[in-house]
Image (cartoon, grey):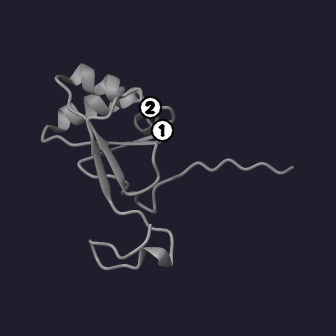
C-alpha cells in the first residue's frame, strides 16, 4: 500500500498497515470465511434462523474465538454452548480479564 490512509492520513508506506475492512456475503466455502483472519477484517453474512447461524459459526477451520450479539441472555448462553470455539464473547469481542485463569502448556526439549 502506498499513499496516505483516507481514515487518518497515516503514511501507508511507513509500515505494515491494513485499513479496517468489512466483507459481506462471501461464499462460506471461501478460505476467507473458514480461516481466522488476524487483522482489522470482519466477514459477515446473513442467516435465517439460529440453526443456520450455528452452522455458519462452526464452519471455521480453527474456532479460536467467536462473538455473538443478542438482547436475550438466555439465548446467548444456549447459542454459546453450541458454538465450537475456544472462547465465545457476548455483546463484545476480544475482551479478556487479565485475572482470568489461562492454561498454558509448556514443554522442555
Where's residue 93, x and y in %? 32, 52
- Of residue 95 and residue 1, the one placed in the foreground of this image is 1
Residue 59 to residue 5: above or below: above
Residue at x 29%, y 77% (from the top left corner)? 8
Marks 1/2: CA–CA distance: 6 Å
Q: Are marks 1 and 2 in contact (CB under 8 Å)?
A: yes
Q: Which residue lies furthest to the top in this view?
A: 51
- Of residue 98 and residue 92, the one placed in the foreground of this image is 92
Residue at x 83%, y 51% (from the top left corner)? 108
Label 1 residue SS:
loop
Residue at x 43%, y 39% (from the top left corner)? 32
Residue 22 to residue 98: above or below: above
Earlier sequence position, callout 1 versus callout 2: 1
* Residue at the disc numbered 2: 60
In the image, taking residue 52 as reference, residue 33 lies left or right, namely right
Q: Residue furthest front?
A: 3
Residue 15 to residue 90: above or below: below
Where's residue 19, x and y in %? 35, 63
* Residue at the disc numbered 1: 35
- Of residue 35 and residue 84, the one placed in the foreground of this image is 35
Q: How many marks?
A: 2
Residue 16: numbered disc: none
Neighbor class of circle 2 (other Cα within 10 Å; few <14, some 14-19, many 20+) is: some
Q: Which residue lies furthest to the left in this view?
A: 71
Where's residue 43, x and y in %? 32, 43
Point out the image quarter for the N terminus.
bottom left
Where's residue 72, x and y in %? 14, 37
Which image quarter: residue 52?
Answer: top left
Label 2 residue SS:
loop
Neighbor class of circle 1 (other Cα within 10 Å; few <14, some 14-19, many 20+) is: few
Residue at x 45%, y 63% (from the top left corner)? 98
Amino acid at each position: 500500500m502506498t499513499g496516505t490512509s483516507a481514515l487518518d492520513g497515516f503514511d501507508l508506506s511507513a509500515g505494515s498497515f491494513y485499513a479496517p475492512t468489512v466483507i459481506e456475503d462471501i461464499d462460506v466455502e471461501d478460505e476467507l470465511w473458514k480461516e481466522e483472519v488476524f487483522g482489522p477484517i470482519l466477514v459477515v453474512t446473513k442467516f435465517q434462523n439460529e440453526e443456520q447461524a450455528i452452522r455458519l459459526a462452526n464452519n471455521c477451520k480453527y474456532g479460536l474465538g467467536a462473538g455473538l450479539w443478542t438482547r436475550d441472555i438466555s439465548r446467548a448462553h444456549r447459542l454459546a454452548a453450541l458454538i465450537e470455539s475456544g472462547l465465545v464473547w457476548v455483546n463484545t469481542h476480544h475482551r479478556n480479564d487479565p485475572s482470568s485463569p489461562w492454561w498454558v502448556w509448556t514443554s522442555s526439549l
